[in-house]
Amino acid sequence: METINMAELDVTLLSEIAGQEENFELFSAPYEYAAVGNQCYHIAYSREYNRGGIVLVGSGSSGATEWTDARSPEEVLIRFEANEMVR
């Protein structure tokens, strides 16, 4: 998982944190089943709210963001991949 800047963040996820950007850290994480080089996850995580949003980006993604309570951005990714999102 690596830190990314606001200009790199998926536009749908960016629109969902609009006006609250300063409360979020932004990350990119590899997508294990990537069929093309541009597939990955984008995560916006707030330590203040212990909440994170995640979206699969790149070719073939739905663009849908999922949100969950979590103690870290890593936990957001783990929950998403295990289909255990806590809403």
Image (spheres, grey):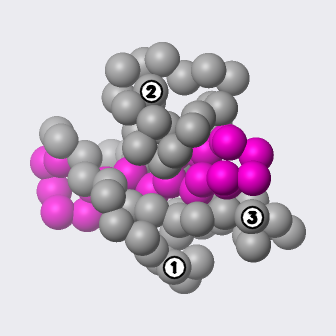
Of 4 and 60, the residue lying toward us = 4
Dot 1 or dot 3: first in sequence order is 1
Give the quadrant of the C terminus: top right
The mark closer to the camera, 1 or 3, is 3
Q: Position of residue 55 (x, y in %)?
A: 49, 47
Residue for badge 1:
5
Distance of label 1 from label 3 (alpha carbons): 13 Å
In this view, 54 is above or below 16:
above
Magenta region includes residue 44: yes
Real-space Cα distance between discs 2 and 1? 23 Å
In the rendered image, which quarter is residue 20 located in? bottom right
Q: Identify the residue at horizontal 16%, vertical 56% (top origin).
A: 36
Mark 3, Cα crowd under 10 Å, few <14 / some 14-19 / many 20+, is few
User: Which three-letter amino acid code belongs to the residue tagged 1?
Assistant: Asn
Q: Secondary structure at mark 1?
A: loop
| Position of residue 58 measured from the top left corner of the image (x, y, whole percent) | 34, 57
Q: How many marks?
A: 3
Task: Tell me: residue 36, above or below residue 31.
Answer: below
Residue 64 visible from this viewpoint: no
The image quadrant where one finds the N terminus is bottom left
Residue 62: which disc?
none
Question: In terms of sequence position, does the residue under pointer 2 or pointer 1 come before the other?
Answer: 1
Label 2 belongs to which residue? Answer: 79
